[in-house]
Image: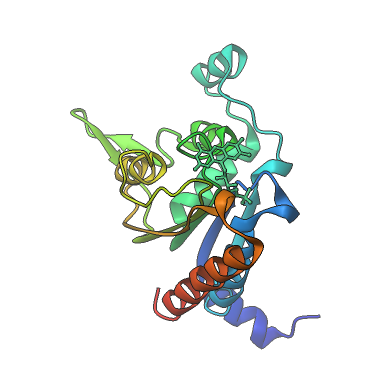
Amino acid sequence: MQNHKSKRLEQKMKSLVVIDACVRQLDSRTLRIAEPIIEALSQRYKVIRYNLPEMDIVPLNPCLFAERGKGSIPAWAKEAATVIAGADRILIVAPFWDMSFPAVLKCFFEQTSLFDITFTDNGKTCVGLCKAPKVLYITTRGMDIETGSDLEQATPYLKALSRLWNLGELTTISARNMDYSTEDEIDVKIAKAVAEGTELAETW
Ligand SMILES: Cc1cc2nc3c(=O)[nH]c(=O)nc-3n(C[C@H](O)[C@H](O)[C@H](O)COP(=O)(O)O)c2cc1C
């Protein structure tokens, strides 16, 4: 049982929202990189985690769209959007799929991008309502595609969404060519990315 002191400390800690879109779950190489980094960050942040593959998230279909028009939003989505808007840091963990990220992550964003929660407008354009000044994105790619290549469409999308929601600086940590590397090479790449992330975690 937590004592009062550690409870108070946890209440005072800043919050980190982890959005985990690793569909292969326990087999995920991306999670092998992310878990030690999350562990390091949990020393300084209160971690709130969304494991998307367990959440049965669907796209905004005609029924959900009509309900939204009437002001009815799924409780989980409203709550997640509110938590994201109030978070101090955001960490997105997602493998590289179809030159971007798994659709479940886009569905999550579609459901949680909510007017007057993650963004609003000023009569002329949209204005973000989130406050996290830093976002970290961890990924692994099967092909030899580097961050910033025009074949890599996850980082640009996350930057654009960050602009809509008023999230700050995006850092991408990646390991690549994973589907064309030996197990030993994969281990080395993962260790390198973990070292990069845990070093960043000390000051991030
Ligand atoms: C459905 C699916 C789509 C993928 N699409 C791509 C792709 O477009 N480009 C690429 O470089 N790798 C692609 N890959 C390979 C993954 O990026 C690579 O295996 C990665 O390490 C998987 O991460 P994970 O182990 O965390 O699931 C794909 C893998 C899957 C399963």
Q: In the image, what residue occupies the spot 48% across and 46% down?
A: 143
Q: In the image, what residue occupies the spot 69% across and 84% down?
A: 4
The reply to whether residue 47 is visible in this rendering is no
Drawn side of residue 58 relative to residue 158, left or right: right
Q: What is the count of numbered marks?
A: 0
Q: Quadrant of residue 164?
A: top left
For this orientation, the residue located farthest to the right is 1
Judging depth in this view, the residue of 193 and 86 nearest the camera is 193
Drawn side of residue 128 relative to residue 33, left or right: left
| Residue 188, percent from left and from top | 56, 71
Q: Quadrant of the C terminus?
A: bottom left
| Residue 122, percent from left and from top | 22, 34
Find ligand 1 in the image and state its quadrant.
Answer: top right
Drawn side of residue 2 relative to residue 33, left or right: right
Q: In the image, what residue occupies the spot 75% across and 55% down?
A: 26
The reply to whether residue 183 is visible in this rendering is yes
Drawn side of residue 101 relative to residue 160, left or right: right
Q: In the image, what residue occupies the spot 18% across and 28% down?
A: 124
Judging depth in this view, the residue of 17 and 11 nearest the camera is 17
Q: Quadrant of residue 55?
A: top right
| Residue 151, percent from left and from top | 36, 38
